[in-house]
Amino acid sequence: MSEAMLDLRRQPKDRAYPQLHALLLNVLGGVDDDIAGMATISSMVHHAFGFLWTGFYRVIDRNLLRVGPYQGTLGCLDIAFGSGVCGTAAAERRTIIVPDVEKFPGHISCDARSKSEIVVPVFDAGGTLIAVLDVDSEKRGTFDQLDANGLERIVRWFAGEGRV
Ligand code: SME
């Protein structure tokens, strides 16, 4: 792993996320490009925690998400609003934590190894939904409110927070 990559797998989450956030703001300093932000955030979140899949689905139409920058195995290309965890989070504009994907009705399986998942909405500075951040884990029950808080803070970069 490059020296800019943190390995936070042994850190408690309440210490891990602030470190990751600080490094991300540093790496993204001077960048004013959402796709570059999505690619960088996907890579750093993915490798810091060793997740199974980490990436963005972008809002490309009122009712459609399309895959954006990600890390991991092949992701589904398009997801309709209201479908799966991503489409539900987009339609309801809220973070969804899924401790066991088999218990989420309509969950879309892109990789059979995925056991739990969190999806966080991404807003621009005007409050418009521009994407969702989807993170998958090979273990059940990986994500909790600390992940929600940490990831929601990270994606506030797209609304201009810490973007210099
Ligand atoms: N599981 C997601 C689909 C995206 S993949 O996990 C990369 C869902 O149910 O929306």
Image: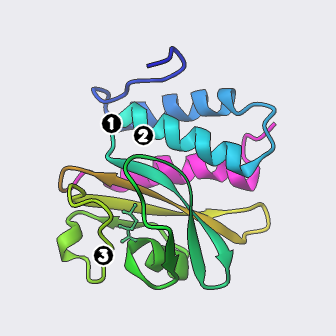
Q: Which residues are magenta?
A: 141-164
* Residue that carries the numbered disc 1 in the rendered image: 50
SS at circle 1:
loop
Colour mapping used in the image: rainbow
Residue located 34% across and 64% down the image: 97
Q: Is mark 3 within 8 Å of ligand 1?
A: yes
Query: From the viewer's perspective, is 65 left or right of 130?
Result: left
Q: CA distance from mark 3 to mark 1?
A: 22 Å
Q: Are marks 2 and 3 in contact (CB under 8 Å)?
A: no
The dot on residue 134 is none
Q: Amino acid at mark 3?
A: His
Report the quarter where the N terminus lies. Answer: top left
* Residue that carries the numbered disc 3 in the rendered image: 107
* Residue that carries the numbered disc 2 in the rendered image: 46
Q: Amino acid at mark 1?
A: Gly
Q: Residues within 10 Å of mark 3 (few under 14, many from 20)?
A: some
- Of mark 3 and mark 1, the one earlier in the sequence is 1
Q: Residues within 10 Å of mark 2 (few under 14, many from 20)?
A: many
